[in-house]
Image (tube, rainbow, N blue to C red):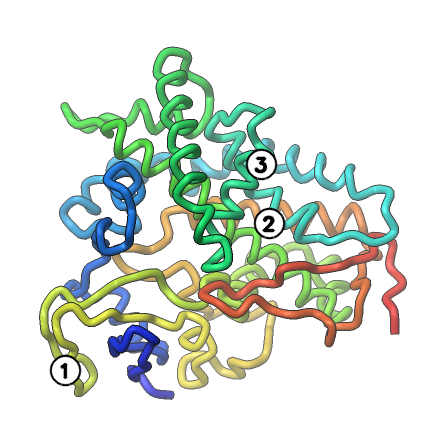
Amino acid sequence: MTSAQESTPPDGTTPVLVTGFDAARRMLSERRTSKVLDAAAMGLSPELGDAMLRMILFLDPPDHTRLRRMVSAAFSAAHIEALRPRIERVAAGLLDAMDGPETLDLIEVYAWPLPLQVICDLLGVPTDSREEFRAWTAIVAGGAAREHERPAQLTRLLGVIRGMIADQRVHPGDGLLTDLIAVREEQDRLSDGELTSMVFALLVGGHESTASLIGNGVFRLLEDRERWNRLRAEPGLLPTAIEEFVRFDSPLATTTYRAAAETFEFDGRTIAAGTPIGISLAQANRDQSRFPRADRLEMDRVENPHLGFGHGTHYCLGAPLARMEAQVAFAALMNRYPDLDLAVPVGELTWRSDFMRTLPSLPVRPRGTRPN
């Protein structure tokens, strides 16, 4: 498997695409690259650019180092574990709503709303605004087809987020947003702009990959009924199985933007300053030289250093929350609906074909009876 190759997009630039596991891991830690974006080049207004591009995802050290250090405690494994009862309540409520229809779309009623409701709950989003937040995030993540809707919706979303921050400064809650507002390191605190960007990142980007993990994982369990039955019989296998779901169907198939900050050599080729660099997590996680039987899903794969949550400086801050949500989602679903099955033949399902690896829909029958 090649470590780096060129592909030419319509604008004529020649980005580098890194595919092999070892090369991808090194590039994810490469300090001679930059994640910083230019608002004007992206066609963003100064207001939107200031809010969106302060996200931790688009910062380089030392700004990234400072911000990550300040908020990391709120995302620690111990802190996230304490959220389990909240996540279980959300899952139970969504499963209650599934008890009725003969056929339903699991993505629509469970995989997508579960992480969105969790993050809305943690951030204190008012209940009557949550459907609107769902619509906003769908537009933001909807690709080129919804690009014309994005600026107006983003502006409105940012206004609501700023209102939430102002309200919780005066009336603290018991969730993540209040924790972030209270973050202090000596005399340093998060600015309103940094808080806005952090909340924006959590609302827009924090749930989509988790929804993909849940949907993809349920599909793989139902695709081969022996997997479903085994995981129900061996619930202790669930954490290992989730890591394998992330590896096998990496929710983020290709990394977000980065470019060479300077000219440097990488695996025998020169990468010029300014060259966009993509890293295929999907291909790296199926690299036969790193993962034995890489094209087989093995729920008991113990050695599994996948790159599904990234690596290095930009390793996913929300990985503990994603793992927790997935554990709760799978366990609750299998316990409530042990006979859950696909409502359509496997061959009729289609995968999204952009930077995400996900199923747009997953028709299921809660009480079984798969069609031939």
**Residue 180, position as x, y percentages in the image:** 34, 29
Q: Write down the residue under mark 2.
A: 327
Q: Write down the residue under mark 1.
A: 270
**To which quarter of the image does residue 36 belong?**
bottom left
Q: Write down the residue under mark 3.
A: 117
**1 or 2: mark nearer the eye:** 1
**Residue 136, position as x, y percentages in the image:** 50, 41
Answer with mark 2 or mark 3, whichever residue precedes in sequence.
3
Q: Nearer the viewer, residue 53 or 114?
A: 53
Asked if the residue at tag 3 contacts the one at tag 2, i.e. Cβ–Cβ closer than 8 Å, the answer is no
**Residue 183, position as x, y percentages in the image:** 28, 27
Left or right: 299, with 205 as reference point: right
Q: Residue at x 66, y 53 (%)?
A: 107
Cα distance in 3D space between marks 1 and 2:
43 Å
Cα distance in 3D space between marks 2 and 3:
16 Å
**To which quarter of the image does residue 241 belong?**
bottom right
Q: Residue at x 21, y 53 (%)?
A: 38
**Residue 250, position as x, y percentages in the image:** 49, 66
Q: Nearer the viewer, residue 35 or 31?
A: 35
The quarter of the picture where the C terminus appears is bottom right
Q: Residue at x 18, y 64 (%)?
A: 33
Q: Secondary structure at mark 1?
A: strand
Q: How many marks?
A: 3
Left or right: 33, with 173 as reference point: left
Q: Residue at x 20, y 72 (%)?
A: 275
Query: How many residues crowd around disc 1 within 10 Å: few (fewer than 14), some, or many (20 or more)?
Result: few
Q: Secondary structure at mark 3?
A: helix
